[in-house]
Image (spheres, rainbow, N blue to C red):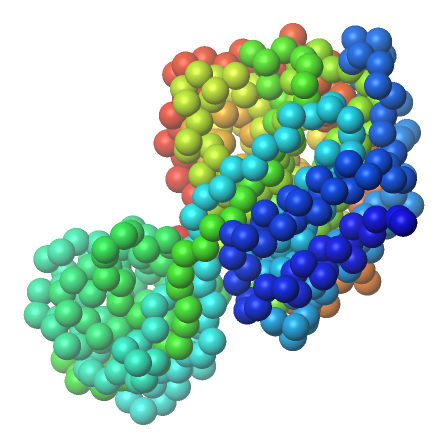
Amino acid sequence: MQFNYLASLLILSNLVSGAIVPQAAMDLFNFVEEVELESNLNLDYINSKSFEDLPLVNTTELQELITEEALLARAEKLYEIAQFSNKSYGHPTRVIGSKGHWGTIGYIKHELKKLNGYYNISVQPFKAFMSEIYKINATINDEIPKSLTEMDMSPSTPNKEPVYGNLTLIANNGCNEEDYIGLHGNIAFIKRGLCPFGEKAQLAARFGASAVIIYNNEQGDIRGTLGVPPEGVHVAPCVGISKDEGDLIASKLSNGEIINAMVLVDSFVGPITTVNVIAETNHGDDENVVMLGAHSDSVTAGPGINDDGSGTISLLEVATQLTKFKVQNKVRFAFWAAEEEGLLGSNYYAENLSVEENSKIRLFMDYDMMASPNYEYEVYDANNIDNPKGSEELKNLYIDFYNSKGLNHTLIPFDGRSDYVGFIENGIPAGGIATGAEKNNAENGEVLDRCYHQLCDDLTNIAWDAFLVNTQLIAHSVATYGSDLSDFPVREISDNVNSMSFAYRGDKLVY
């Protein structure tokens, strides 16, 4: 009898009730994988000859093994897995804690375990924090601000009911304790800037604010996050509004006008255990590790086939085809969890490296959103002055590849929106590519990914030509550095701490 892996995952996931899958579910997924491997049915194992008998990885040959058909097949499987969440969420999703995400973890491990010992596969459990904002409301002088915006990781107002009070204008952007004197019982009105939103909400709570309204200090949305709440620290419920509306209200408060306000937040903020999956070649120089990663989770709203199913698929396909070659330097593939909650998985990994393990990682390459439908070929604009030495070399590798194909590219900033952050902050050279999210394409003026963080990020939301090109580029990066690092800057102990500050954690502003 043929073993149907996806069907078995679905059956097991349906045994678990509720939206948050407990640890026991992960054990069940592991059991299913072991049963299939033991059954030895229809598994495409690599030849069992020793790694030393394989040819050294070559970029041209590795790229030729990457096909659009293989990428499509993996995308279809990932969408099937996202549908495991339909009963709990009402739609496909691979958000952490969902059946769709545990199914994704199981699929990643299953695909890697098929490769007959080429990789050492491990999981790294960690505690993440999930945040779901179900409802917000606010009034200022009995009018709802037109620009009212939720703040990720905000707690609910007491009993999920409105709180009322006069607005108190907080001085100096609200970054110091003395700014909050006399606040008790009122709603704090704070300008964005100088310190993280989370610090403002914590200080406001300490001095008795019933809620916080933060107004922007620049034009545009204030999509922010309060960050992971410190253990035992109270955080005030928080919403945001625009600069234009905020400046007008701040001016009135400065002139002594009394302004009443109401804030309502209905949310969930809570811990959940999830896992990173790490696969490292079982041969190659372990003093010179080439590392690359993509995130395995989606937002709650949709299946995330582009964001970042595309990166997950690219890494799996490159990892599979790499088994036909040997490498000179160890190659480590990482599949991060909880990127959408604020880069939690990759940050946890990087921050918990020992000094010795940190120094062995020569570089990290981030691959997030490889196939946006109205794509541009984006390269992180790294340099060796502001970023760890070697980051500029990564940028140049990507640029040279696109130039060799006659393709235009766009440089984008290291602003904190993907999983390179923890590596740069810990002194590890980093780079990466993307195809764009909510911004407009410079050539045609249309949004790069019209389904970014939406339900429609499904199989129809993929640019297959860009997907193929970028997966071949990932193969090129692995072949280049997996075979030779002699021209790449040597890591230095002084690189192990980097002071670069990032305004974002994922797609949310931090300050």
Q: How many numbered marks does the figure carry? A: 0
- Judging depth in this view, the residue of 199 and 511 nearest the camera is 199
Residue 367 position by quadrant:
top right
Residue 181 location, x and y as percent? Answer: 9, 65
Q: Is residue 174 left or right of residue 479?
A: left
Residue toward you, 14 or 147: 14
Q: Which image quadrant: the C terminus? A: bottom left
Q: Is residue 482 above or below residue 115?
A: above
Counting from the top left corner in percent of width and height, residue 288 is at 59, 14
Residue 311 is left or right of residue 340, and the answer is right
Q: Residue at x 41, y 56 (%)?
A: 271
Rendered view: 353 above or below 453: above
Relative depth, front residue between 299 and 447 = 299
Q: Is residue 270 visible?
A: yes
Q: Residue at x 71, y 11 (%)?
A: 328
> In the rendering, at what x and y percent does residue 209 appear?
19, 71
Residue displayed at 38% across by 25% down:
497
| Residue 455 image offset from top left, x and y in percent | 68, 68
In this picture, residue 435 sits left or right of residue 68: left
Name the residue furthest front: 1
Q: Is residue 93 visible?
A: no
**Residue 289, placed above or below residue 229:** above
Q: Left of 461 or right of it: where is 281?
A: left
Q: Quadrant of residue 484?
A: top right
In terms of image quadrants, where is residue 450? Answer: bottom right
Seen at 74% across and 23% down, the residue is: 118
View extreme (bottom): residue: 142
